[in-house]
Image: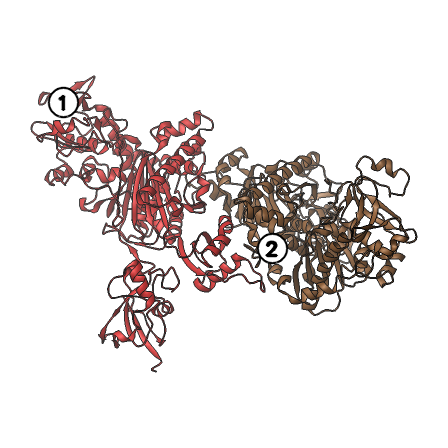
Chain colours: A brown, B red
Amino acid sequence: MAEDALVVFTPSGRRGRFPLGTPLLKAARALGVDVDSVCGGRGICGRCQIVQQVGSFSKHGIESREENLTAFNEVETRYKTKKGMKEGRRLSCQAVLRGDAVIDVPADSQVHRQVVRKRAEVRDIELDPAIRLHYVEVDEPDMHNPSGDLERLQKALLEQWDLSSLECDLHILQTLQKSLRDGKWKVTVAVHRSKVIVAIWPGFHDRAYGIAVDVGSTTIAAHLCSLRSGEVIASSGIMNPQIRFGEDLMSRVSYIMMNPGGEVELTRAVREGLIELIKEVCAEAEVAPEEVLNATFVGNPIMHHLLLGIDPVELGGAPFALALNQGLTLWASEIGLAINEDARVYILPCIAGHVGADTAGVVLSETPYLSDDVVLICDVGTNAEIVLGNKERLLAASSPTGPAFEGAQISCGQRAAPGAIERLRIDPETLEPRYKVIGCDLWSNEEGFEQQIAKVGVTGICGSGIIEALGEMVLSGILANDGTIDGGMAALSPRVQPDGRTFSYLIREGEPEIRVTQNDVRAIQLAKAALYAGAKLLMEKLGVESVDRIVLAGAFGSHIDVKYAMILGMLPDCELEKVTSAGNAAGTGARIALLNQKARDEIEQVVKRIEKIETAVEPKFQEHFVGAMGLPHASDPYPKLAQSVPLPAPKRAQPPQSEGGGERRRRRRG
Amino acid sequence: MAEDALVVFTPSGRRGRFPLGTPLLKAARALGVDVDSVCGGRGICGRCQIVQQVGSFSKHGIESREENLTAFNEVETRYKTKKGMKEGRRLSCQAVLRGDAVIDVPADSQVHRQVVRKRAEVRDIELDPAIRLHYVEVDEPDMHNPSGDLERLQKALLEQWDLSSLECDLHILQTLQKSLRDGKWKVTVAVHRSKVIVAIWPGFHDRAYGIAVDVGSTTIAAHLCSLRSGEVIASSGIMNPQIRFGEDLMSRVSYIMMNPGGEVELTRAVREGLIELIKEVCAEAEVAPEEVLNATFVGNPIMHHLLLGIDPVELGGAPFALALNQGLTLWASEIGLAINEDARVYILPCIAGHVGADTAGVVLSETPYLSDDVVLICDVGTNAEIVLGNKERLLAASSPTGPAFEGAQISCGQRAAPGAIERLRIDPETLEPRYKVIGCDLWSNEEGFEQQIAKVGVTGICGSGIIEALGEMVLSGILANDGTIDGGMAALSPRVQPDGRTFSYLIREGEPEIRVTQNDVRAIQLAKAALYAGAKLLMEKLGVESVDRIVLAGAFGSHIDVKYAMILGMLPDCELEKVTSAGNAAGTGARIALLNQKARDEIEQVVKRIEKIETAVEPKFQEHFVGAMGLPHASDPYPKLAQSVPLPAPKRAQPPQSEGGGERRRRRRG
C-alpha cells in the first residue's frame, strides 16, 4: 500500500492511485485530465504547469504534504530561469509522486481551455485548433536496419503522441532530412486535424498562428490569432480591391457578364488584397507569414466563389445555384495566399445562393441551433440574410433590401466613413436637426463643432444616420404613415422644403447640401419592407407569431440604434431588451472555426439541416412586402417608447465590435 | 413462374432468376458479373456488349432461344451505326430478358479484363486503373429546394454509381457549373481511387490516359497507356538531362555537394526532360497532355529523390538514409508535370538507400513474393540490385558493382550505342576475334562488313561486348583463372600484346584501336565479384545453398548472353534454362501500378516486409567478394557447356524489351 499514492486533480475532480515515482503529467494523462504539453514531458515547453494544493483535504480524504512531491528539480529551474514561471507552479512532467497529493490544473495549462468571449449571452470558444504542434525525438537511421526518415518520424509520432497513419506534404519531405539532422533528431511538427504533417522545425518550436478572414464586398477584415492561446494578436482591415469593378455585388457580376474573363480579374483583385492584408497584420504582430499555418474564411456567396476562382455569374440570376454548399479545406497556395506554403485554408460552407459562408459564420457564432428560444438573426448588408429558429428547426433566407441601409441609393447617402452623419435628432417643436458626424466628437449644436468639422467636412449621411433621420421624422410628424413628407409642415419650418413635385427635409446647408428627399424615404421604405417581409415569411414557415429574441449582426446592426429600427418597423415585434447586436458575427464565426476544428464539422452539419427559403419564389413574401411598406404614426407604441428612452452613449466612439480578449485593433474607414 | 427467367453468364458461370423485363446489364450487376459500363446503361458507351448463346444448353438446363431477349433496338442501331459493333453482339443495357438465356461476356466487355503480357512465366495485368470514368445525369437546380451543383453531382454519383463521400479538386469546382450547363446536366467525371473527382467533361467522354515512367540515371522511358483498354499506345525515351551534371549517380551527388543549390538544378533538369518526353509521347499517340490523368514513376533512390525535389546527398554516404520509403500520391503539378492539372502521380516506394522504386517495380513485375521457388532477381545497372526469396521471405540488397558492366571504367568501354561492339567470338585455334557492332547487321568477318561499318565506325565496346570478350578469353585460354592475361599466348598470336608491365588483347586495329587491357579484366572481375558476393550473401541470409531460378532485369540483363555471365561466375549456379531475362521489369512495374490500383497497395505491403540488407555493414560480403574474384579455367564445367551450346540469334535485332500488346514503339540511342 505504501507503494502507491492517491492523487486528485482539480477542478476536474478526477482521482486515482499511482505507483510512487509516477510523474504527475503521466498520472493526469492516465486519468484523462486535460493537461497541455507540446514537448511530451521533456520539461521544454512549460505547458504542463500545475500547482500543488498543500494541506489536509478532508473532502478528498487526503493529506497533501509538500514533501509528497519530489523537490523542484534542475529541469524546472532551467525552465524557470529561461522562460519564467509563477511562484508555486511546477512542471507536472517533472514533479513526481512520493505520496498523496491534490493538484490544481490552472486554466492556462489546459489543452481545451476556453477562449472567453465578451458577450455574456454567447458560449466561449473551446480552444481545439486544427493545427497542433508536437515535439518528438526520432530514432537515428541504422544501417543494420535500413528505414526512411519519414518512417522513423511517423513511428515517433505514434509512440510519443499516439498519432497514426499521418500523411506528409511534399514540402515537408523536401526539408525533412535537414530538419532532423539540424535538430539532432529532435523536431517539432505541425499536424493538421491529426492527419497530415504540414510543417516541421528542427528542435523545439512553440509558435503557431492562424488567421480568420471575413471577405466582405466592401471591406476585408482579418484577425491574426495565436493557435496556442487562442488570443487575437492583431486585427486589420482593407477595402476590398474589387470595388474598382463595382461598388456593389451586382455591378461586379455585371462587369463579369460584360467582360469575358472578368471573373479572373476579380479573383486576382481579392487575392492580391488578401496578400496585402495578411502581410500587414503579420507585420503588426511581428509574426512571419510562414508562421501562419491555418486560415479560415467567410464571405457572401459571390465573394466566396470569387475567392475560390469560381465564376459567380450563376449566382446573378435564377435559379441562383451555388457551385458548392459545403465547407472546403484547401492548401493556402491553391488560392494564392502568401502564408506558410503548406498551410491549410478552411472555407465555411455557403447555405444557399443568397445566403453565404458569412451567414454560416453568424450561425456558428450565435448558435441558434442550440437555442431553446426562437431567435431571429438579421445580418444586414447590401441584402439582409435572415436566420430564424431554435434547436428544433432553423430556416434561412435572404431579403432583397438592396443597399439603401448602407447609404447607397440615398441622394446624400454614403458609406460609413469620416464626414458621414451617423446620428440625428429633430426637435419636435422647432423641427431643427442636430447630428453627429463620423470623425467628430461633438454634436452639431455643440460649441466648437464647426471648427472641428472643418477638417473632414460633412460629406453625406450613412446608413445609421438615415435610419435615425427617418425615425425622428416620424416622431416629429414630418413623415406621414404612408411615407409622404408632409408638405403642410413647410409652413412650420423652413427645413421642410418643396422639391419638385414632392418635399424634402434639409439637414444642413452649404456645400454639399445634405437633405432627406421623398425618394430617400421611398428607398428606405422598400428596404425595411423587404427585411420585415423576409422575417415574417420565415416566421410563418416556422409557424410562430412572434420571436423570443432578435440578434442584429454586421456593421449596420451594431451601429444603428435598435430603437429606431423598431420605430420604422424594420423588424417584427420584440421586447427592446431582447434585441441585441452581435457585431461582426460572421468574422467571429471564422475565428471560432479557426480555433476549434470540431466547430467546422458542427457548422457543416447545421448548414445541411437549415431549411433554405428562396424569397423570389414565395408569393407570400410579396404580400408581406407590400403590407410592410407603411410607417407608424407618431402616436404608435414604439415612437412613444422611443421618446421615453434616454439616449445611449454614442456607439462609434467605442472600439469596433469584436470580442477576443486582449486584442489590439486597427480600423480603417474611407 | 412465367414472370421470371433464368439467366446464365459465361465464362463466370454465375446464374440467377430475374423478372421478365430485366435488362441484362442489371442482371449481370446483381449477380456480380464483371461487365463494364461508363454511361451507366444509357446505350452511349458501348462498353457492356454481350453475345447471346442461342441453343439448348443441357448443362445449364436452359433453352436459350433468340426471342428470349428483346429485339435489337433503336439505341443499339444508333450505337452500331455511329461506332460499329461486331455481328451478334448486343448492348446488355438494352437487351431485356423475355425468357431464359445464356449470355457470354467477351473479354473486352469486362471491367477487370486481363492485359496480356508476352512472357509466359509472369502473370497478366488485371485492368483496374486508379482513374475511372463515370457518366452521370445530374438534377437541375431548383429554387424551391436550393442546393449546390456539387451536392447534386455527388448525389447523382451516389445514386448512379454507388460512389459516396467523393471529394473534389478546386479546379473541378471552378469549371463545374459550366460543364454541367454545357452538357445539359449530363457530364462525365474522372474519379481517382473512388475518392476524388479529378476531371469533368460536359456530356459523354470516353478517353482517359495514363503514363508509366522509368526514370533511369541514363535514360528516361515513358509508356503512354489507355486507361480504358490497358494497352500501351506509344512509348518513347530520352537521355536523362541530368547527364550534363555527371555521367553516373555519384558524380551527380558530388556535383550537389560541391555546388550549393545544385539539387534544385538537377530536379529542374529531370522535370524539364519529363515535360519534353511526355509532350513527345502524347504527340505521337495524338493524345492531348490534358487527357493524361494518371502517371506512375519508378527510379533508383537518387532519381526518386531528385524527381521529388529532395536533396539526395544523404544517400551519398552512410547511413544512406532515405527521406521516405513509402509510396506517394501527389498532384502532377507538385512535381511540375505538364499533364492534366489535376492528374495524380503515384511514385512507387523505395526499398532502402541503395534499392529504389525501380527495384520495387521489378518486384511488382516479377512477383517473387508469390513464388514457391526461390528466385534470384538481379537488376544490373551502375550497381546491381538483388532480390532473393519466395512467398515466405524476401531479401534485398545492392551490390557495389560500379559501372563496369555498363562499359564505364573500361579502357575502350562505352555505353550501348551505335558503334559499340556488343558481341564477340575468339577462334580457339587462331585466337582471332570476330564481333558484331551495334548499328550493323553483319559480323566483322562477313562480307561487306567494312563498307557497312564505315558510316558509324567502331567506337568502343559496351557491357555485353566486354562480358563476351572476357568469356571468350577464358574459353580460349588467354585468361588465366586468376584473371591474368597470359603473356605466354603472345607467342601464339599477335593479338596478345605486351602493354606496359602486363598484356592486352587487341580486338581491332585502327582509329580508335579497340583492345581489352589487364585493367579492364580487373574492373570486370571486381564488378562480377561484387554481384556474386551480393547474391551469395542473400542466399546465406535466407539459408539456401542454391536458387531455383534467376531473373535478369534491366537493359544489361536482356542484352548479355547469360551463358557468358555464367562462364565468368557473375551469378550463382543455376540451370541455364532457369535463367531468364525480364527486360525493363522496373518500367513494367510502373505500368502495372498504372493499370492496377491494388498493385500499389500490394507493392507497398511487400516492400515493408522485404528484409533490407546493407552490404557495407556485412563482413561476410567482403569475404564472398574476395572469394569470387577468380575466373574459371577453360576446363571448368561452364566453359564446356558454353562451347556446346549453339549461338542464339542476335538479340539486339529484336525490338526492345517490353510486353504490352499491340504497342507502337520508339527507341533512342546515343
Q: Left or right of A359: which side holds B124? A: left
Q: Can I make out residue A298 in this image?
A: no
**Residue at left 33%, top 52%?**
B392
In front of the other: A143 or B342 = B342
Q: Are marks 1 and 2 on the same chain?
A: no
Residue A138 drawn at (x, y percent)? 52, 41
Residue A563 drawn at (x, y percent)? 82, 56
- Determine whether B421 is above or below B554 in the image: above
Instruction: Give the residue at the far right of this rendering.
Output: A429
Q: Where does the C terminus of chain B fall, quadrant-wise?
A: top left
User: Is disc 1 in contact with disc 2, using a CB cutoff of under 8 Å?
Assistant: no
Residue A654 drawn at (x, y percent)? 80, 44
Q: Where does the N terminus of chain B fall, quadrant-wise?
A: bottom left
Q: Of the numbered discs in the image, which one, if any, rests on residue A350? A: 2
Q: In the figure, residue A534 lies in which quadrant?
A: bottom right
Mark 1: amino acid: Val
Chain for numbered disc 1: B
> For the residue labelled by badge 1, is the local secondary structure a helix, a strand or a loop?
strand
Residue matched to label 1: B496
Mark 2: amino acid: Cys
Q: Left or right of B481: which side holds B289? A: right
